[in-house]
Image (cartoon, grey):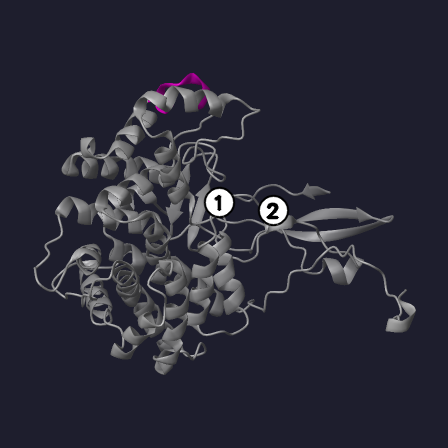
Amino acid sequence: MSTAGDTQGLAPSKDNQKSAKLSLDGKDFDLPVYEGTVGPDVIDITRLYGDTGNFTYDPGFTSTASCESKITYIDGEKGLLLYRGYPIAELAENGNFLETCHLLLYGELPTKAQQEDFNERVTMHTMVHEQMTRFFTGFRRDAHPMAIMVGVVGALSAFYHDSTDINDPVQRDIAAIRMIAKMPTIAAMAYKYSVGQPFMYPRNDLDYAANFLHMCFGVPCDRYEPDSVFAEAMDNIFILHADHEQNASTSTVRLAGSSGANPFGCISAGIACLWGPAHGGANEAALRMLEEIGSADRIPEFIKRAKDKDDPFRLMGFGHRVYKNYDPRAKIMQKNCHEVLQAIGADRDPTLKVALELEKIALEDEYFVDRKLYPNIDFYSGITLRALGFPTSMFTVLFAVARTVGWIAQWKEMIEDPEQRIGRPRQLYTGPDERPYVPMKDRG
């Protein structure tokens, strides 16, 4: 396959068209080629089956653009992550999570009046229906918080019927606000249930991250005032995880939404996908590795094992599937991580001491530097969340709280896309050909 035509510069959508030529069985087929604003061009194969009788084969869809989107862009070679065109570092250093939510949902940074209105709308929706508290008593006391999240978030559609009509833009917006507002409350309730403490109602006088910490660590008998360092770290964790292009859980939300499912059910599906250890559980795996190492004097032993290609051991939390350079989120998370560790006194936790020493060695070791195996966001977020007091079972839950705005923004974009159609991937069938039914008495 070859492409023809010169690059036309930056294009806002699929207006500038080139073409690719496919030769198959002695016939040539012209396929449209579209340019994005930045990033690789895409070859349009929507008519491929109709024109040629063939499908494409792309396990994991790693070379397939499943949609057109204006929300998030990643350049793995450059270590670049943009939300609506804004570098992630600038958003994390200068803004806050709810400002980022407004950006992802509506496409632009808010004015002061817009931000105040948005903040108030989110704040007014942070409580959940009181009857939802009964759901939690139906779970075993040792239920994984993610199992609780999948069930309770899906059940929101049974309580908020006035925001499930996906064809009504007003209801779509209400559903988006409700999801962003209620997810921290539900996550905190899942945590409280797992440790046997009473649920804490949200406080309207606190910002988003501080309120979440209050609902997780506060108790009715004493007023909890979140530490500003902890609240800032939590807010940045939310910003850095808010969206990440068409990853597995986001694609799951879009696929579920393509059938016309209500937004609460779609987000529940995304949470279920995120639960997978290959997706949302990477920071938990990194922390388990640190616990396996145990003490700083054992680090050289594990470094040696990581360099041995015949040893199955791998350093978790280093390198990234998408980023072939330094993960841009990791630089920000590193700063917050060190601030939190300093605030709590990392010397009190041997696992955190191991993390700091391993980070130092890996950043200086020629083997890791040459291969660009830098600590990624999962390495730092796992350490930070541990330092904040969260058990590893809550790590993916916090990921879900942050990613909710990305999921709902992607869902809204899909619903409003005139080219949207129900997802229906194809397959390469390698099973038996058609064969007749054999009666039981003749099966030998």
Query: Residue drawn 31% across and 64% down?
Result: 183
- Where on the picture, by quarter, is residue 70? bottom left
Q: Is residue 105 left or right of residue 435?
A: left
- Where on the picture, by quarter, is residue 285? top left
Relative to 369, is 419 above or below?
A: below
Give how far across and how far down residue 225 sits, in percent: 10, 54
Q: Check residue 367 for magenta coloring.
A: yes
Helix, strand or loop for disc 1: loop
Which residue is tagged 1? Answer: 38
Q: Is residue 211 left or right of residue 295?
A: left
Q: Is residue 277 left or right of residue 375?
A: right
Outermost residue, bottom direction?
162
Is any part of residue 401 visible from this angle?
yes
Relative to 283, is 133 above or below?
A: below
Give how far across and how far down residue 5 sits, in percent: 65, 43
Q: Which label belongs to residue 63?
A: 2
Q: Which residues are magenta?
A: 361-368
Q: Is residue 293 left or right of residue 342?
A: right
